[in-house]
Image (tube, rainbow, N blue to C red):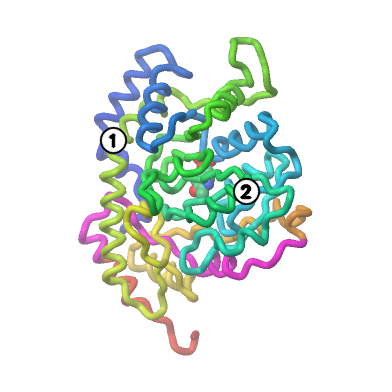
Amino acid sequence: MIPYQSLKEVTARHSHAIHEAINRVVDSGWYLLGEENKHFEEHYASYIGSKYCIDCSNGLEALTLIYRAYIEMGIMKAGDEVIVPANTYIASILAITANGLIPILVEPTWENLEIDDSLIEKAITERTRSILIVHLYGRCAYTNKIAELCEKYNLKLVEDNAQAHGCCNNAGHRTGSIGDAAGHSFYPGKNLGALGDAGTVTTNDELLANTIRVLANYGSQLKYIFQYEGKNSRMDEIQAAVLDAKLQYLDEDNHRRSEIAASYYESIENPLITLPREIPSKQNVYHIFPIFCRYRDELQTYLHKQGIGTMIHYPIPPYRQECYVNQPWNINSDKFPITDRIHREELSIPISPCLTENEVWTIIEAINGFQIETTLR
Ligand SMILES: *Cc1c(COP(=O)(O)O)cnc(C)c1O
């Protein structure tokens, strides 16, 4: 059996360094807001190319804190609008609605799977304050046009970099350093994963960084003095130590992912299956390798029988989720046929850096052998 992803294998490769990091924290007697967070923040900020990095409890919290801080700073207020791709993971949208902001959903393109920048300007109103781009599947969603629109309409460009650690834009800048602020998730399955929940914010904006740091620690800068109605959004020292130990292997892992992807692009040939458009390898860190098929469910069952684990990212788009169907901003929203098609046809095949060459070939051959009864077509 080739699992979709084995976190046990991912961790085992660096088990010595990880155990050493954990033991260091255990023995130190210091478990929150200490040296480990400080070191990881420094190293990750310099890796991304941002001035500030503020550790927090998870990726959703990172994104939520960015918008909360903009509200506290008087830059946004409840009822303001944020443009966001309709086909994102729900966390991007939760970060908006959790702050009383209104998500304005925009279709992706079928070719790139990222927000269609030709549709953004039409979606801008006098209440628009921000565009949240999502580097979904590890593909860079940034375009010069998006930056121009942010400039023209004075909008904050926020990046959801949960799936794209190490990715670069067309100018060679790391995603997470391109916009005004970025939220990163270190959920265990992400390219850089913790052994539990963790996330961080990167930004070059000093005031934003300070506001987030205070909000994430009960709204308090001085002990027992509460400036904001804050939250507890801290990252454990143990997770920071683990992430710091794993950060040095991130580029290697991303490189291995891109080699596997190159084999897929070269050798998957099946008229029933579409691969996403290939983009320059620096602009994709292949967090997920999505393939598309009208007979997606049959393909998944078939691959399972061949001993290949797959996943669906994601089965139901956010705008069709129960929690959002009756929201006023959603009731009159346009239909999203491309988003629907992506959710209907997407299947994620294994892309773990732990895959062997043999396993990659087994996957390719199985996919190429997929057929559908002519009566079904
Ligand atoms: C994983 C993910 C998040 C949220 O991260 P958590 O750490 O699980 O809260 C946000 N956005 C996207 C696109 C993600 O894939």
Question: Which residue in the structure is indicated by mark 2?
Answer: 93
Where residue 359 sits: x, y (%)? 25, 60
Identity of the residue furthest to the front in this view: 152
- The stretch in magenta equals 332-361
The residue drawn where x is 56% and y is 45% is 157
Q: Secondary structure at mark 2?
A: helix
Task: Please name the residue that numbered disc 1 is placed on.
Answer: 248
The reply to whether the residue tagged 1 has its Cβ within 8 angstroms of ligand 1 is no
Residues under labels 1 and 2: Cα distance? 31 Å
**Quadrant of res 7:** top left
Q: Residue at x 39, y 65 (%)?
A: 304
**Where does the image place residue 210, in percent across and percent down from the top left?**
55, 24
Q: Is residue 164 above or below residue 221?
A: below
> Would residue 171 be counted in the magenta stretch?
no
Callout 1 secondary element: loop
Q: Which of the pair 132/325 is nearer the observer?
A: 132
172 or 80, which is in the foreground? 172
Q: Position of residue 276 (x, y in %)?
A: 41, 66
Question: In the rendering, which numbered label is found on residue 66?
Answer: none
Residue 359 drawn above or below residue 41: below
Quarter of the figure with the N terminus: bottom left
Which amino acid lies under the numbered mark 1 shown in the image of this protein? Gln
Give the amino acid at mark 2: Ile
x 40%, y 39%: residue: 193
